[in-house]
Image (tube, rainbow, N blue to C red):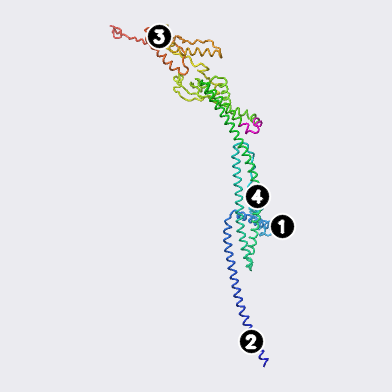
Amino acid sequence: MNKILFLFLFVSSLVLAQNNDTMTSAELQEIEQAKELERKEKIQDYLTKLEEIENDISKEKVWMKSYASYMTSLDIRAKLDNIKKRIKYLKKKGKSISELDELNALISKEKILASQIEKLKEKGTAPFSKLLTPPEIEEATEITNPIEIFTGISLIKTQNSDYNDYISRKEKLAELIVLLRKENEIYKEIRNIDTENVYTQSANLKAKELKRFETALDTMIVTSEVYQKRLEIREVNINKDIEKQTYRLINIGIIILVLFIIFFLMKLIVKKYITDNERFYMANKIITFTNVTLIILILFFNYIENVSYLVTILGFASAGIAIAMKDWFMSILGWLVIVIGGSVHVGDRIRVDMDGMKYVGDVMDISLLRMTLLEDITLTSVLDNRRAGRIIFIPNNYVFTRMISNYTHSSLKTVWDGVKVTISFDSNHKKAMHIAKEVAKKYSKGYTDITRKQLNKLRNHYSLKNTNVEPRIFSFIEANGISIDSWYLTNAYATLTLRSVISLEIIDAFNAEDDITIAYPTQKLHVETLRKPPFDTKEQEIV
């Protein structure tokens, strides 16, 4: 009985234990499903965060494009190596048609990949090679003149701009690394719950990517420090040269200013003590020329480092320069002849023959290359040009090749002018000559006295044979009468005025005389009439 009871209790306990085990497995399965669902939800959350980070990373196009190009070049190199191995194998053992076709296709593909490798050559050697390399620092030459100061300042600005760009790239790289680290942290979390190892390869690639970017940042930090030191040294040297040239420019400016003041005072003294306009003009010109020459020499010897080298170059180039600038050199030489020789002065009245035209006027200026002439109304203007008042520019080299007449050379301010009146053959020519002489004496007396004094002064410089200054009367036989030429001295600047007065006075005096007739071209006609005879012989009839 006891045995039966024990057996019953044992069987009951077994049945009860089996029911308990069945409930535990169901609960465990539910728990496992809940855990799996939770794991997938976590992974999905992590993937969402990764997508957001990837969007932020994709905004940094410069670094990511460079890295993508680098990875592409590595992939192409790997493919190219495999293709080369396959081509090598097919060349040795390929015999079938399909293998030969495959060989030709691989050779074509090899050429394409090789060309792509050449384009990505710099990308394949090291990642970010161009981005990590700082801009080249130009080899700055020594600043030797004020114009190069602006070049030095521009160089400093350019270098600072390049350095700022480089630092900007470094800061963007640092921001990118922060994002990549966040991405790697998320991948680590995913790997901890990724029982199927789905994201293991992606996590490894992202870890390598982060390591490469961190290596690039370390390189860039060291490079930027060295680059900054080099730029500081270069900037210090440029600033020293700029400071040196600035001080030199200030000193030269002070010297030039002192020269201007000295020559300005000299001009004031000349203006005060020289009353003659011609002498004042020449003195003023000499002072200005000396001032400019000194300034040029000061600048020349301050900013030409190797004068002997320049002289050598000019020596070799002198022949070509002399041919190319012949007219200029001749004009400068003509200026020296004019200024030193004194043949023409400012204010002189001259006549110049240029290209078949004759110009008479007053010299307004004598520069290094040309004379400036103001054309006046003269007999030449009346008879030839029929216009006046023009500004004529005469090259100085014309003193060697053209006819230049000076009407007011040295102290002589008068010229001989003449009036021609023709009288008839039956006129009293002696009385006419006497009248003409008296009229010329009357109106030219002042100029005659002035000329006499001027000629006496000229005797000290020139040999004068005939110094007669009285009016001269000449008579000539012409086709239609006797020509009475009256020559007298007049103001070189106003010949037409006195000529007009004397001409009218002579005409009035001749008209007042009964035995003087002014002649002009005339013609006499002899007319004869034809008379008829009293009988016309042709009409008579003979019987």
- Look at the image and tell me in which quarter the N terminus lies: bottom right
The correct choice, above or below, for 456 with respect to 262 in the image is above
Give the SS element for disc 4. helix
- Residue at 62%, 81% (x, y): give it: 20
- Residue at 45%, 24% (x, y): give it: 389
Q: Which mark is residue 12?
A: 2
Residue 152 visible to the viewer: yes
Q: Position of residue 472 (x, y in %)?
A: 46, 10
Circle 1 residue: 92
Labels 3 and 1: the sequence-earlier one: 1
Q: Which mark is residue 424?
A: 3
Labels 4 and 2: the sequence-earlier one: 2
User: Does the magenta stretch mainly form a helix, a strand or a loop?
Assistant: helix
Disc 2 marks a residue whose amino acid type is Ser
Labels 1 and 4: the sequence-earlier one: 1
Disc 4 marks a residue whose amino acid type is Glu
Q: Position of residue 249 (x, y in %)?
A: 60, 35
